[in-house]
Amino acid sequence: MDIKKLISEMTIEEKASLCSGADFWHTKAVERLGIPQMMVSDGPHGLRKQDLTAENPGVNLSIEAVCFPSACALACSFDRDLIYRMGQALGNECQAENVGVILGPGANIKRSPICGRNFEYFSEDPYLASNIAASHIKGVQSQNVGTSLKHFLANNQENRRMSVSAEIDERTLNEIYFAAFETAVREGKPWTVMCSYNRVNGVYSSENKMSLTDTLRDRWGFDGFVVSDWGAVNDRVKGVAAGLDLEMPSSGGVNDAKIVEAVKNGTLSEDALNKACENVLGIVKKYLDGRNENAVWDKEADHRLAAEIASQCMVLLKNEDKILPLDKNKKIAFIGKFADEPRFQGGGSSHINAFRVTGAIAAAAEYADVSYAQGYRTDEDAADSELLEEAVRLAESSDVAVIFAGLTDLFESEGFDRSHMKMPECQNELIRRVAQVQSNTVVVLHNGSPVEMPWIDDVKGLVEAYLGGQAVGEAECAVLFGKVNPSGRLAETFPRKLSDNPSYLNFPGEGDRVEYREGIFVGYRYYDFREMDVLFPFGYGLSYTDFEYSNLSVQTDGCNAEVSVTVTNTGSVAGCEVVQLYVHDCESSVIRPVKELKGFEKIELKPNESKTVSFHLDRRSFAFYSTEIHDWFVESGDFEIMIGKSSRDIVLSETVNIKSDDKMPYICTSNSTMGDLMKIDCARKYMDKLIDEYSRMMQTESDNTELGESTKLMMEHQLRDNPLRVMVSFSDGAITHEDIDNIVKSINDELNR
């Protein structure tokens, strides 16, 4: 397919037609020129392909498929290779079903724990989110199938999601919300990117040139096509001009006609239309060139992979008295409807028609004889007294009770935000009552985002399973009975209560406007800066074994650093450890978090085995985004390299000096403060002279030399926030405006040499 030649042979009407879908799931064909259509399907944790063989194939009627763990669980693996393997399986499934692009993954930041779509997103941390997304993308696209990284940009709430404007300052936009996508684009190279419904700083994402062209293409090098979220288009002509290539679903020709009219009347350049066509056809060609007619979808094999992945994502949050793993010879009660019918995925467009679902009751047969009580209903909040009493009696007669609880689709789903962080009251009451009669109580959670835990001190064990996919029961039993050593780590902070969250006062905003006033202080960046007590910190998770860290080494070269650390399994069973690297700027000219994740690696160790983990830190690892230069900036100075088991458990650290060649443009004026000028090498001598002169003026006859030095130091502190011009007023004529003008000129001359 010679794309440029084909475009040159198209009419304007045919070009415009390529810029919208043929229906809900297909791009348009141009039969006259032999251009076929391509099918796209929902994802991202399974193939939600519309069943076209059905007699009346509705939009939501999808084929039987394999449901892998949702993003909320996947990120807790901290395992790039594992996510890549899942991507490979998804890509193969797409090839077997002739799907060209699977929609996902979602890399949006978890700004608030009550965003209804958080289960589809990876993390509150942009470094983790973007790296996990990149692995997902690489895995899928290794099978010559495209991904659609979404939802670009700042889709952090469901409330008024089609109209709300996310008001975000430039630094926050770049350090947090762009950063969640940047590595995924630069390294993952997704075939497509999906724009979000919302507006950013007043401009709809579907017509936002700053994000779609200036950032995505010009800064990051994206070369695929940008597709709208389904129904996200506001003004189609503005969208084409801004960089939105494909509108989905079909507009029935309405918006195609608007594009044609705009080109003909000169309000839209034909070059912009040609570029959109080129982008769309480039991906269609890429898929056709990589089409594998022999791909075989082994659902059973993918089910087994889903179970393996889920087991590596589960987070052991509490294990008092080593109640886990469970003793198979004890009398064990499984309590809660989710033990039999687990909640394993979120509601909405990513809902997979799983061909089989395995709950914990069925999976437990491999390990032990367990008893079961339903405990609660999932269609109401209030407790069912009969079910509750049955569960309490079973717990009391058992040696250990494992309660399977969490959130239902009534509490969290795409399309609406949660109004609180509470679990259903019937489940909270069940946990309280069971814990009163059974001291050996373990809770297993099925939820897409953090919940409050008023009963946390009353239970001995806690496993966060998140939404673990169709094989979640198998994975849960593998962890509970010790077949798998849990190695998941939280990809988000669990605050004690909703009002602790930094976005609390500004979520979901007022009307069609939400201000991101917490700025860069999202998630652990805020909690750690405030030294605030949390339920469980970012990066936290326990194991059935113990790990020790030693031999931290940091070698620097300018703005780069090579870091290595040795990790040893000092326990009696094999296990995986997630090594986390954080960076702290010891002294900065701007407010920065006390630590930021800049590296992570997951390693497996046998008992008494040691491995050395290495990290490379580039200049971006030490940089902040400067609104003065509209780019990333590294300040020379001391940085602390921290190795931790979580953001709150730093086990080793070393302070190193980073030498940067970055220079902030600066123009000295009479209104420049003396404190700012003291930080500039060439200006310091002039400030010292002014301070000396001012200090001598302020000295009295009783001042001795020692007092004179202290006076000078005092003056320096007093004067640092004063503009230069104030020295004229304070010097009683000893310092003139001409003197200040000469100093300003001298400093600027030296700065510009």
Image (spheres, rainbow, N blue to C red):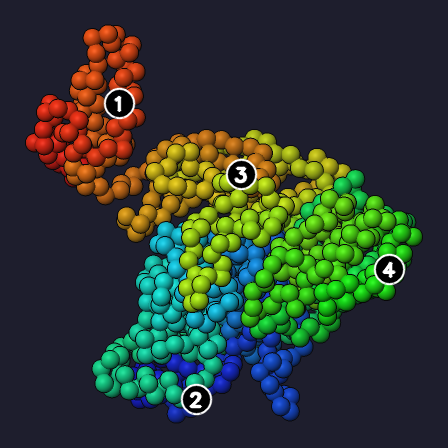
Q: Which residue is mark 2?
A: 252
Cα gap from disc 4 to disc 1, whole angstroms: 74 Å
Q: Which residue is mark 3?
A: 531
Q: Is residue 701 left or right of residue 19?
A: left
**Position of the N terminus by quadrant:** bottom left
- Give the residue furthest to the left: 738
Q: Position of residue 19 (x, y in %)?
A: 39, 81
Cα gap from disc 3 to disc 1, whole angstroms: 33 Å
Q: Earlier in the sequence, mark 3 or mark 1?
A: 3
Q: Earlier in the sequence, mark 4 or mark 1?
A: 4
Q: Quadrant of residue 55?
A: bottom right
Q: Amino acid at mark 2?
A: Gly
Up-down relation of residue 440 to residue 214 (above or below)? above
Residue 715 has which mark?
Answer: 1
Q: Amino acid at mark 4?
A: Glu
Instruction: Categorize mark 3 by other alpha carbons within 10 Å: few (<14), some (14-19), many (20+).
Output: few
Q: Is residue 511 left or right of residue 447?
A: left
Cα gap from disc 3 to disc 2, whole angstroms: 55 Å
